[in-house]
Amino acid sequence: MQPVETSDPDGVDYGWVMQTTFVLTIVVGAPVVALLSLRTPLPTWGARVEFAIRVGAVVWIVVALAVYAYARRFDAGDGGRDPDEIDGDEGS
């Protein structure tokens, strides 16, 4: 039986990279900003916002590069299947 729709992205699935980066940046970034803010004097709301943006930007770039490297290394878009099995005969 042939599948109704197929997708064969060449290389990295950038949609997956963007979604994963978004989620991990929030999950990792919020605790990092909170922990680092404990030892930093932040007297005004402006200082707090500036601090969160600066730390968050660093967290975002580190997470984005790590997720992209993971996607390139393990080709996260194919579910870990052998490319020959995806396009070839899977039943024999």
Image (spheres, rainbow, N blue to C red):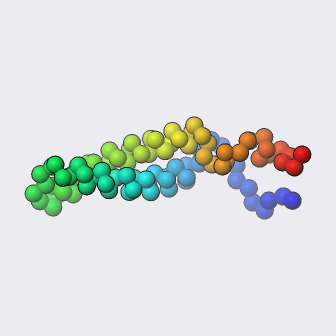
Q: Residue at 25% of width from left, 51% of height from top?
A: 35
Q: Is residue 20 left or right of residue 42?
A: right
Q: Nearer the viewer, residue 7 or 21?
A: 21
Q: Position of residue 59 (x, y in %)?
A: 35, 47
Residue at screen point 70% across, 53% down: 7
Extreme residue in the left direction: 43
Q: In the figure, is residue 85 to the left or right of 67?
A: right
Name the residue nearer the viewer: 3 or 39. 39
What residue is at 55 percent from the left and 53 percent from the top? 15
Q: Position of residue 79 (x, y in %)?
A: 66, 49
Judge from the rendering whether residue 84 lies leftward or rightward of residue 26; answer left or right: right
Q: Does the rendering let one see residue 53?
A: no
Q: How many marks?
A: 0
On the question of residue 67 being in view, the answer is: yes
Q: Quadrant of the N terminus?
A: bottom right
Measured from the top left, where is residue 31 in percent x and y?
Answer: 31, 54
Answer with left or right where residue 42 lies relative to residue 89: left
Front residue of 32 and 54? 32
Q: Residue at 49% x, 44% y: name it.
A: 67
**Picture coordinates of residue 91 (x, y %)?**
87, 49
